[in-house]
Structure formats: structure tokens, C-alpha cells
Amino acid sequence: MLPRRRSTCSGRAPEPLGIELVVVSNAELNAAPLGDRVFGALVQTPDEAGRVHDLRAFIARAKQAGVLVAVGTDLLSLALLTPPGEMGADVVYGNSQRFGVPLGYGGPHAAFFATLEKHVRQAPGRIIGVSIDAHGNTGLPHVAADARAAHPPREGDLEHLHRAGAAREHRRRSTPVYHGPKGLTAIASRCTPTRSSSSTSSGSSGSSQLNDVYFDTPRFEVPGGAQAVGQILKSALKSKINLGYRRDGTIHVALDETTDAADIAAIVLAFAAGVRRRRGGGRPVARESAEARPRLSQEPWSAPRPS
């Protein structure tokens, strides 16, 4: 799971709930023991390193052992990837910021939570989904996100914060309605070409792309160790680019549908700065290979989305 979610579970599960947490790596997931004391599993795809995982075998094994599985995921990636629910997950959750809401210095952003019908009564809060009205028509219930706005704000209160949160939530809801399945698939697909050019271009600068399958976050191993990573950091900051510098010495690059050729060229030059420093000189040259990695639609566990 993501580090922040692991931290939350570590702080709340042992005390006062008395739940023992056992953390295993993704590589050990399919071999993880599911004994009598295991009742649930939290997994993430794409994970914190950007890797996409095929969870079907693990979920099938968990169901045989009577273990419930909750999967954290990237909502936009599900426009291209097979949703965890179709893999058999009991719960799917995550963040909906990518549906038309700016990052806003980290949020907060609306979450999403989906579960099987048999678990609905155990879920906290209210579950919003397709329903049937009094006339027998199919409809999508609406919960007023700005209910607090009905009360006149008083001097010094925080009513404007509630209003701002409601506006952000309305925008998040409107994005899938406006774009529809085809539009969301097109937005998600725009991450794919830049993903390929980033992988091949950074490879030409001496870096190795490590993630076999990913949605929009490639991860690179940089020759030269910490010194090269330091030079990449300086070069990227000069171009106003934030990269993900990991404890294992690798670097991940988060792309999205707004990433263009100029952004990719700047990223490649930042990586080339680390290689140039290691080699002792030379001008870095950004090159893009015509050979692209396979698109996600060709991966064995991806499925075409409905039109």
C-alpha cells in the first residue's frame, strides 16, 4: 500500500483495535501465507513505485481462504486497465483528484469507495450508486455536498471553506459525466505516448527503466549513484520539475495528460546532466526513439473499456 496509508493503519489498527499488521512486498504477495488469523488484505495497483500488478491469482487464492481483499487504485488508470472489481476485489478505494480537480497543494480531495452489494450494510456513511425512483426510472442519487451552505455564515466562521469544498466536489462529479467513457479513455491514453518517449529517451541518456508494466509513472535506475542523482535533482529544479527521489536510489517520474514534448525534453536533459557529470563533461543531447513500448491495451490483464 502507499506509505501514508500504511502509516494510518499502523497508527490505528494495533491500538485500540488489536489488529496485527503483516507487511509483505509485492514480489512476495502471491506466496504470502493466508492462515486462519488472516481476515483481510490491503493491496495497491498501481503501487507507490508506479508498477501495475495483475491481482487475479492473489484475489482468487484469498477468496478460497475466506480473506477479504481491498484494493487501492488510481481512478483514471481504470479507463485503460481492468478494474480490481472485475478481478474479484471486495472493496476498491482511492482518490478522485484526477477527475478534473487541480492538485491544489496536496488537497484534500474527494475519495471514492466501492464495494460489493453484500458488504453495503457494513460500510460507513452512505453508498451512492444507481437506484430506482418512485416511478420505476433508473437514476443516480445526489447527496448535497453543500448542505452547510444553507446556514447563513457568521463573521469569522469557516463557511467559505465548506463552499470551496463543495465546488471542488461538484467539479469532480461533472468530469466523468461531461467526458463519458470515450472521453475518459482518451484522457488516460494521452499518458501512454509520453510514457514511451520518456522511457526510450532516458534510456539513451544512460538510465534504465525498471517498471515492467505501469500506467503513467516510469521508474529509473541511474548509473553513478547518489552523485548522479544529486546532479539530476539540481538540473530538474532549474527547469522547475519535481521528480520522485526514492530511498533505493531510483527516480520515478509522474506523467499525466498535460505532459508534452517540451516536458519530456526537459526531463531527458535533467537525466543527461547526471550522466554528463559522471562521465566528466560533454553536452547532453535529448533524443527520442521511434520505437515505443507496448501500449497498455496490449498487456495480458488489460481490457477494452465500454464505448
Image: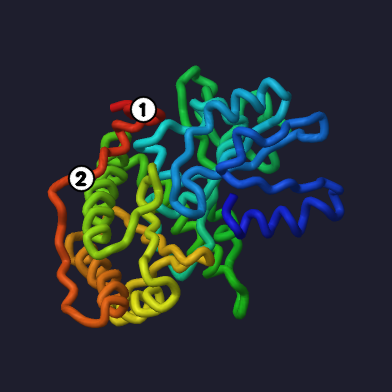
**Residue 276: quadrant of the picture:** bottom left
Seen from the viewer's position, the closer of residues 291 and 237 is 291
Question: Disc 2 designates what residue?
Answer: 292
Question: SS at mark 1?
Answer: loop
**Residue at (44, 51) in percent of width and height:** 50
Query: Can you say whether 156 is above or below 50 in the image?
Result: below
Residue 79 x %, y %: 36, 37
- Is residue 279 toward the left or the right of residue 35 in the image? left
**Residue at (55, 63) in percent of width and height:** 162
Query: Can you say whether 272 is above or below 210 in the image?
Result: below
Hey, which residue is sitting farthest front in the picture? Answer: 279
**Residue 225: quadrant of the picture:** bottom left
Q: Amino acid at mark 2?
A: Ala
Seen from the viewer's position, the closer of residues 54 and 282 is 282
Residue 6 x %, y %: 66, 55
- Is residue 301 toward the left or the right of residue 181 in the image? right
**Residue at (32, 27) in percent of width and height:** 304
**Residue at (46, 28) in percent of width and height:** 139
- Is residue 48 toward the left or the right of residue 237 in the image? right
On the question of residue 252 being in view, the answer is yes
Question: SS at mark 2?
Answer: loop
Question: Disc 1 designates what residue?
Answer: 303
Q: Amino acid at mark 1?
A: Ala
Q: How many numbered marks are there? A: 2
Seen from the viewer's position, the closer of residues 94 and 284 is 284
Residue 239 x %, y %: 27, 77
* Quadrant of image for the C terminus: top left
**Residue 294: quadrant of the picture:** top left
Residue 260 x %, y %: 20, 60
